[in-house]
Amino acid sequence: MVKVRILPEDRVFVLTGAGISAESGLPTFRAEDGLWAGHRVEDVCTPEAWERNPWLVWEFYSMRRAAAQRAEPNAAHAALGEMEARLGERFFLCTQNVDDLHERAGSERLLHMHGELAKSRCELECGRAPVEDGAIYGSLDEVGRCPCGGRLRPHIVFFGETPLGMERIQKELARATLMLVVGTSGSVYPAADFVYWAGRSGARTVYVGPERPRNAAAFTQVVEGKAGEVLPHLFEYV
Ligand code: NAD
């Protein structure tokens, strides 16, 4: 395997997707036995689904909360935690994942662009911050309400909603000299475009995953393999 050299002047932007948590036992969206087997995405992860049937949405996310709580970070999450410990503020992690496995592997400089499973927020845009909420609900009656009266919804960016932290992401991408992308199929936007944005500012771009992503042609280097097997041996710190 050709090592990726990390130079003293490098600023590293990491983008992770569902694939990095696959070896922790959390299914990816597009896996054949994946999350959508029994649930069509448009039935559970859209603002329309929430309007139509909030309990179906909560049932689905309660199931995902339970799975994430049972899962443990794997060697790939740990390798990124170690990279951050070495690079400090020259490191930034943007994840499309809503589980908390990166945090549990020591990552702190991270942004969850698609939200967080372990938080809830008001369904109305009343301005209150999301609250910690790992509850696994058994019925809609158990779901709390915001002081403004709105029902709590999962702190998740549904399909069709704007990702979180885009300003910060753009700033970090513009100053990155090395971009590492792990376990994402390159089919959910805008995340699939980040490699082009980083490339425009001259960054080297590396993809790690068992199959080539849709946007593979945009990368300087594609390393085919499972994240947990590849990442612990991929980097050479100069
Ligand atoms: P995706 O399901 O579209 O693609 C997953 C990718 O991971 C595939 O390209 C696959 O080849 C790769 N992969 C599978 N096993 C891997 C491994 N061991 N190591 C490295 N890569 C591996 O997922 P996506 O691109 O992240 O986009 C879909 C959406 O899925 C995102 O918005 C994300 O929020 C959401 N999602 C999150 C979780 C989670 O939080 N754990 C789980 C499922 C989906």
Image (tube, helix red, strand yellow):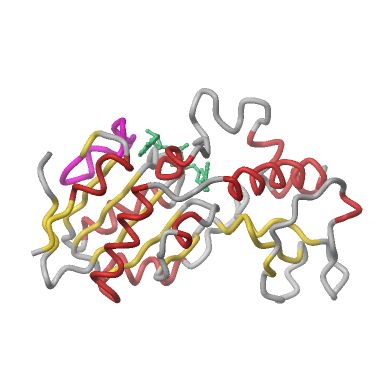
Part of the protein shown in magenta = 209-222
- The reply to whether the magenta stretch includes residue 211 is yes
Residue situated furthest top in the rendering: 32
Q: In the rendering, at what x and y percent does residue 74 appear? A: 40, 47
**Front one among 138 and 217:** 138
Q: In the rendering, at what x and y percent does residue 205 appear? A: 21, 51
- Displayed quadrant of residue 121: bottom right
Q: In the rendering, at what x and y percent does residue 13 appear? A: 29, 62
Split into quadrants, the picture shows ligand 1 in the one at top left
Say above or below: 10 vs 19: below
Taking the spot 21% from the left edge, 55% from the top edge, the residue there is 199
Please give left or right for residue 115 compared with residue 24 in the image.
Answer: right
Residue situated furthest right in the rendering: 141
Say above or below: 125 vs 16: below
Taking the spot 35% from the left edge, 55% from the top edge, the residue there is 78
Please give left or right for residue 198 compared with residue 141 in the image.
Answer: left
- Displayed quadrant of residue 89: bottom left
**Front one among 202 and 27:** 27
Q: Quadrant of the C terminus?
A: bottom left
Q: Quadrant of the N terminus?
A: top left
Taking the spot 18% from the left edge, 64% from the top edge, the residue there is 177
- The reply to whether the magenta stretch includes residue 121 is no
Q: How many marks?
A: 0
Please give left or right for residue 184 compared with residue 3 in the image.
Answer: right
Q: In the rendering, at what x and y percent does residue 189 appear? A: 45, 48
- Displayed quadrant of residue 23: top left
